[in-house]
Image (cartoon, helix red, strand yellow):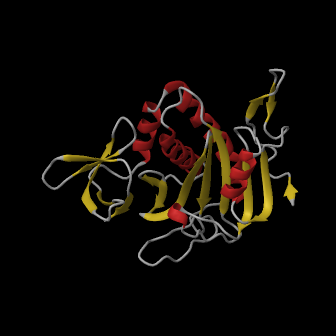
Amino acid sequence: MDDERGAGTVLTVTDREGGVVSAADKGLVRTIAETGSTNADVLALAAAGAPEGSWLRAERQTAGRGRQGKPWSSPIGNLYASTLVRARPGDPPAASLALVCAVALAETITSLGCPAVTIKWPNDLLLDNAKLAGILLERHGDAIVAGFGVNLASHPSIEGRATASLAGRLWVHSAAELYEHLVADFATWLDIWRREGLAPVISRWERQAHPSGTPLIANLSDGSSVPGKYDGLASDGALRLRLADGTARVIHAADVFLV
């Protein structure tokens, strides 16, 4: 069941005659009561030819997922939303969209009254060093789907990992309000990424990150772990770790945790 929440969001697209219309008018920004996974739904929409700028929010998911297929708890009251980006020739590396997503979501939450949120590489959002939000990117062909999960009203209990929500933090905004602002902020940062490249995205990401020197551990796909201290990002968006011997190691793929 679709409703009109989010229809006031301003996101511009170009119609076939070259005129500029709003995403709401084109039906690109939608909210539904329940689905299995908004990422799965938007991937299906992409396969059917949906345009870039399509968004879907569900009030509840029954089969939400995070990285590596891990289940994502999806009770009513939190944000579950996904959007579609179409890769274009000349775009920065598609993997760097993870940073774009993190910057856009951090800016949205900060502007709505929670300046304490920080980013952990590549795109987890933390509150008091506990996970507040996660972002999952999935690709099929030129379709890249970015899914956002934000703990607003509640947060799951996960063994071995601290989690947080915005409930009780003087947060007064609903998931629908957060969604509306996120749509606009993501469109802004996607445009910056395309027009100006990755440098301004990295600069904004680093300003929102935990302090330089924060102890981290990177768990690599081969099962090894690399402990070090956060030393900013490389020019391609990879994580720089300062090792105990003073040398720097660049991490392109890993699960990263605060120590």
Task: Point out residue 6 in the picture as x, y percentages from the top left corner.
Answer: 78, 49
Could you tell me which residue is drawn at 80 percent across and 21 percent down?
18
> Is residue 173 shown to the viewer in this render?
no
Lateral position of residue 142 relative to residue 27, left or right: left
Task: Point out residue 66 in the picture as x, y percentages from the top left corner.
Answer: 55, 63
Residue situated in front as seen by the camera: 142 or 53: 142
Task: Point out residue 54 in the picture as x, y percentages from the top left corner.
Answer: 73, 43
Q: Quadrant of the N terminus?
A: bottom right
> Is residue 160 shown to the viewer in this render?
yes
Question: Picture quarter containing residue 256?
Answer: bottom left
Rendered view: 242 above or below 162:
above
Residue situated in front as seen by the camera: 256 or 42: 42
Lateral position of residue 113 relative to residue 81, left or right: left
Q: How many marks?
A: 0
Residue situated in front as seen by the camera: 62 or 113: 62
Task: Point out residue 199 in the picture as x, y percentages from the top left corner.
Answer: 42, 31
Could you tell me which residue is drawn at 40 percent across and 49 percent down?
209
Rendered view: 216 above or below 144:
below
Could you tell me which residue is drawn at 43 percent across and 72 percent down?
161
Rendered view: 78 above or below 49:
below
Could you tell me which residue is drawn at 74 percent across and 38 percent down?
51
Rendered view: 255 above or below 138:
below
Question: Picture quarter containing residue 202?
Answer: top left
Question: Picture quarter containing residue 203?
Answer: top left
Lateral position of residue 254 relative to residue 170, left or right: left
